[in-house]
């Protein structure tokens, strides 16, 4: 009961916070453009203008298309990154000699900002979907691989020993012990992987010219419509957070709560 | 003989001496063996080799005529830490080994409940591991091990992470359960009292290298009571032996340093 009302208060608090923030923004806009005249109104976004841009883009459906295409690409790219990440992590964990060198190599590649893969991807695939997915996969899969590998490596060895003396070996050991034991670390790795994937996707979309949020951002620039640019930026933030907070961290909470964490 | 340890030695790469050296020990079916000795004398290492978690550098171990080469459900092991699976409920933990064996689900359910009942935790079947006390965890760990009905049960200091009161209670319960099941058990303990309380034979070991020093049959009727005069006599004699070993290994360690 008490927890509920506390959560409600937290909600109210954050609504209030954003309302005040938007109000201040509007005031700042009015101050700078109308009253003092030090900013050009086309160079400074305004909350009402963002709202207008949103309504316009919603009305001509470009908003929905952009979100749908970006969403599909994110799902495909992130999904593929998980699959590749898990496979690479299994190779990393196999303990064979070359794999000992692969890990520092991947850690190194991981430091490359994903936008740097764009020129490569365009030369390789041309300006199409494959290029963008490729950028996402390069941006996210190694991070996932490294975190899955560490999730497996950090499984309490005692649990593995106990399970082995109860007859669990090979695939059974993975299925019944290593995977569930590593699950919290795996999900934490997915969260990080998601943030890489989302950034990489936007980098790819900004650079290419297919429908999507990144492209809408560039359209806003071409039209010199700063309100559209702002709107799309806000959408990118919100969608990124929605997947992280609304989906991945819900699963995480569920998994951790079971263990009393 | 049921379990045969033949000339088993184990040397780890980073130590000069053998952690376990030339151990010969045979154990009959239904026997309760207790291993005592100074810290570092190789008790855990010996137990791990019986479990198949560790391989001897030389010598062999046979269970029921079969050479031990890998871990298996016929040699379940319990550790000082209950090592329950935190993502499973109490009941699911107890079912763990049975599910690995792919038995019939209804039978698994029934068997798991039976053993939970045996450790007096059937009321807690659907609790999560983090909701249990240390003593309850160790009980679940025992139910999980017993449910598998292995040929031999290996216990490495199963009570040493618990407080004195819990230990006393748990000891009595384990003694009762053992009288009912008459399972073959090897228990490592640092408590001589515990060894005399449980053991059909108490094996004392010495360190650096880890050797069997003595094997003492405990001819006391069960249930045993720690305040009986014969019990105390046994305890004193073994304690003296172990103490001299502890002193010797400590002196050695200091001498080396
Ligand atoms: N995995 C390992 N690698 C290297 N040395 C080891 C390993 N396990 C044990 N040892 C060494 O082997 C010797 C025996 O260790 P073991 O754990 O069997 O002793 P113990 O009798 O169980 O001691 P305690 O009563 O403290 O549990 C020790 O000197 C220890 O340092
Ligand atoms: Mg030990």
Image: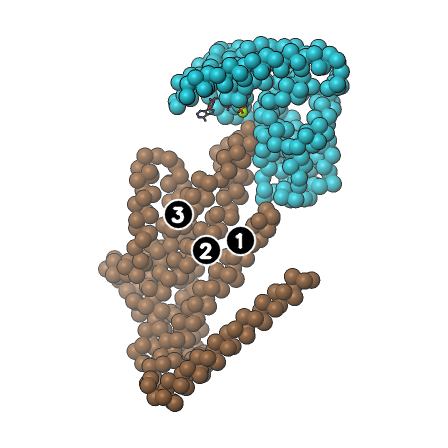
Quarter of the figure with residue B25:
top right
Disc 3 is placed on an element classified as helix
Query: For residue A250, which quarter of the picture?
Result: bottom right
Whichever of callouts 3 and 2 sits on the residue coming sooner in the sequence is 3
Display colour for chain A: brown
Q: In which quadrant of this rendering is ligand 2 seen?
A: top right
In this view, the mark in front (3 or 2): 2
Same chain for mark 3 and mark 2? The answer is yes
Residue B122 horizontal/vertical position (percent): 73, 38
Residue that appears at 58% across and 44% down: B87
- Could you say whether the residue bearing mark 1 is in a helix, strand or loop? helix
Q: Is residue B134 left or right of residue A22?
A: right
Residue appearing at x 48%, y 76% in the figure: A21
Dot 3: chain letter: A
Q: Are marks 3 and 2 in contact (CB under 8 Å)?
A: no
Q: Confirm if mark 1 falls within 8 A of ligand 1.
A: no
Which residue bears the numbered disc 3?
A145
- The N terminus of chain B lies in which quarter of the figure? top right
Q: What hue does chain B carry in this figure? A: cyan
Badge 3: residue crowd in 10 Å (few <14, some 14–19, many ≥20) = many
């Amino acid at each position: 009961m008490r927890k509920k009302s506390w959560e409600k208060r937290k909600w109210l608090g954050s609504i209030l916070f954003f309302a005040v923030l938007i109000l201040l923004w509007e005031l700042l806009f009015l101050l700078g453009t109308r009253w003092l005249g030090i900013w050009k109104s086309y160079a400074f976004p305004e909350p009402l203008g963002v709202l207008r841009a949103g309504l316009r883009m919603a009305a001509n459906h470009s908003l929905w298309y952009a979100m749908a295409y970006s969403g599909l690409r994110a799902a495909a790219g992130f999904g593929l990154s998980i699959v590749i990440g898990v496979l690479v992590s299994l190779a990393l964990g196999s303990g064979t000699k070359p794999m000992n060198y692969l890990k520092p190599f991947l850690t190194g590649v991981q430091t490359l900002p994903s936008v740097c893969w764009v020129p490569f991807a365009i030369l390789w695939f041309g300006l199409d979907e494959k290029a963008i997915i490729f950028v996402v996969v390069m941006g996210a899969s190694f991070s996932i691989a490294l975190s899955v590998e560490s999730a497996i490596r950090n499984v309490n060895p005692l649990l593995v020993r106990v399970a082995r003396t109860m007859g669990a070996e090979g695939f059974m050991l993975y299925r019944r012990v290593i995977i569930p034991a590593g699950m919290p670390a795996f999900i934490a790795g997915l969260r990080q992987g998601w943030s890489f994937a989302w950034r990489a996707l936007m980098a790819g979309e900004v650079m290419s010219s297919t429908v999507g949020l990144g492209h809408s951002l560039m359209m806003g620039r071409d039209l010199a419509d700063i309100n559209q640019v702002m709107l799309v930026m806000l959408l990118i933030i919100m969608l990124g957070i929605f997947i992280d907070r609304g989906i991945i961290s819900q699963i995480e909470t569920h998994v951790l709560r079971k263990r009393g964490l | 003989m049921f379990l045969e340890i033949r000339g088993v030695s184990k040397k780890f790469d980073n130590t000069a001496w053998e952690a376990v050296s030339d151990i010969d020990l045979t154990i009959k079916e239904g026997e309760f063996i207790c291993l005592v000795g100074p810290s570092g004398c190789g008790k855990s290492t010996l137990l791990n080799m019986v479990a198949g978690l560790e391989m001897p550098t030389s010598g062999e171990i046979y269970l029921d005529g079969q050479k031990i080469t890998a871990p298996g459900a016929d040699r379940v092991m319990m550790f000082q830490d209950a090592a329950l699976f935190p993502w499973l409920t109490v009941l699911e933990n107890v079912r763990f080994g049975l599910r690995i064996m792919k038995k019939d689900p209804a039978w698994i359910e029934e068997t798991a409940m039976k053993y939970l009942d045996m450790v007096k935790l059937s009321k807690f079947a659907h609790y999560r591991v983090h909701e249990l006390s240390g003593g309850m965890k160790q009980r679940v760990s025992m139910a999980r091990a017993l449910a598998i009905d292995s040929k031999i049960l290996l216990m490495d200091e199963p009570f040493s992470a618990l407080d004195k009161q819990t230990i006393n209670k748990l000891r009595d319960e384990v003694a009762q359960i053992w009288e009912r099941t008459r399972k073959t058990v090897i228990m490592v303990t640092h408590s001589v009292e515990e060894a005399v309380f449980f053991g059909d034979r108490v094996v004392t070991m010495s360190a650096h290298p880890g050797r069997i020093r003595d094997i003492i049959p405990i001819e006391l009727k069960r249930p045993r009571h720690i305040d009986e005069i014969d019990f105390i006599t046994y305890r004193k004699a073994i304690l003296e032996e172990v103490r001299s070993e502890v002193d010797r290994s400590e002196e050695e360690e200091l001498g080396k340093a």
